[in-house]
Amino acid sequence: MSFVSTPEESDPSFSLPLLPVAVLAWGAEWLRDLPWRNTRDPWAVLVAEVMLQQTQIDRVLPRWSVFLERFPDAATCAAGSAGEVVQEWSGLGFNRRAIMLHRCATVLVKEHQGVVPKELLALLALPGVGPYTARAVQAFAFEQDSAVVDTNVGRVLARFAGHSLKPRQAQDMADASVPVGAGWAWNQAVLDLGSMVCQARAPRCGQCPIAEACVWQGNREKNGPDPAPGSAGVAGKQSRFEGSDRQGRGRLVAALGLGPVDRNHLAQVMGWVDDPERAHRVAATVVADGLAQETSSGFVLP
């Protein structure tokens, strides 16, 4: 993504930092005790961040440590097959992330001696690693003063600024907010602030440590519109899962984890007994994404 500044984006108000002392103090008291916060191992942090993409914490909690027991480092992951990684990933959803993580491990072994790099450009060059994940590894594994912007952070930023933010504006504002030497604590605190207090549907402004300086909190009392929807980093409403292609894909991958799927049973496995044409069309996308291989009789894990 290209970040080309405009006069509007250069306005100092877009880099207005959050109040560091108040946010850090709140985090010191309320930060959640999550297992990946107790490690600085870059591979373990990277696995956690990839798992947490589009998957709720409660679903990741029981799976993260189990995955690391089988694939404790990039070299072990790369040495395994893509199918083994997908099998261990099963149940977390968005299984293509498992393929990308396996490819990432392979690149780490070939180009970085199995070591996760700390430089931003090197991290961004890894398969499946985008701006958020790269900066998260910097902040949470290497404790660099690198700011992360996900849907929770993006919501806090937009509401604090009082207007929708473009990607460059949101990142600049986040960067300007990180206290020197406190990148780990700051980012974790803002993530939890967005998740626990500055929630999408029912924000708890009375519990927010920066409410008095939040522009939207003042406007909200006057029924001002929420600036978060559509702002940089803030996720939109996800499409319905029930009956979707995603559901069928997930069913196929889960079945493949138990063994080969016969071509004649594909529609049944994917939940579309009356629509075999759809089953074969969607199965083709699973193969194209590297999540399965097609054989003469059906499908198997890669």
Image (tube, rainbow, N blue to C red):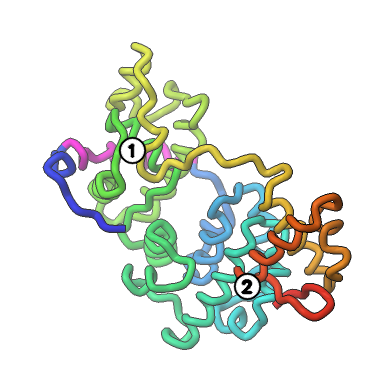
Q: Could you say where residue 272 lies in the image, as x and y percent from the top left?
A: 81, 51
Q: Which mark is residue 203?
A: none
Residue span colored magenta: 13-30
Residue 290 is marked as 2
Label 2 residue SS: loop
Mark 2: amino acid: Gly
Q: Residues within 10 Å of mark 2 (few under 14, many from 20)?
A: some
In reply to whether residue 28 is colored magenta, the answer given is yes
Instruction: Indicate which label's residue lies in the foreground, 1 or 2.
Output: 2
Q: Quadrant of the N terminus?
A: bottom left
Let me know if residue 166 is in the magenta part: no
**Residue at figure coordinates x 64%, y 64% from the top left:** 285
Q: Are marks 1 and 2 in contact (CB under 8 Å)?
A: no
Residue 250 at what x, y percent from top left? 72, 57
Q: Which of the pair 270/62 is nearer the observer?
A: 270
Q: Residue 239, located in which quarter of the rendered image?
A: top right
> Which callout, 1 or 2, points at the residue further toward the start of the chain?
1
Residue wearing tag 1: 157
Residue at x-position 48% and y-position 39%: 236
Depth check: give the residue in front, 25 or 261: 261
Q: Nearer the viewer, residue 56 or 231?
A: 231
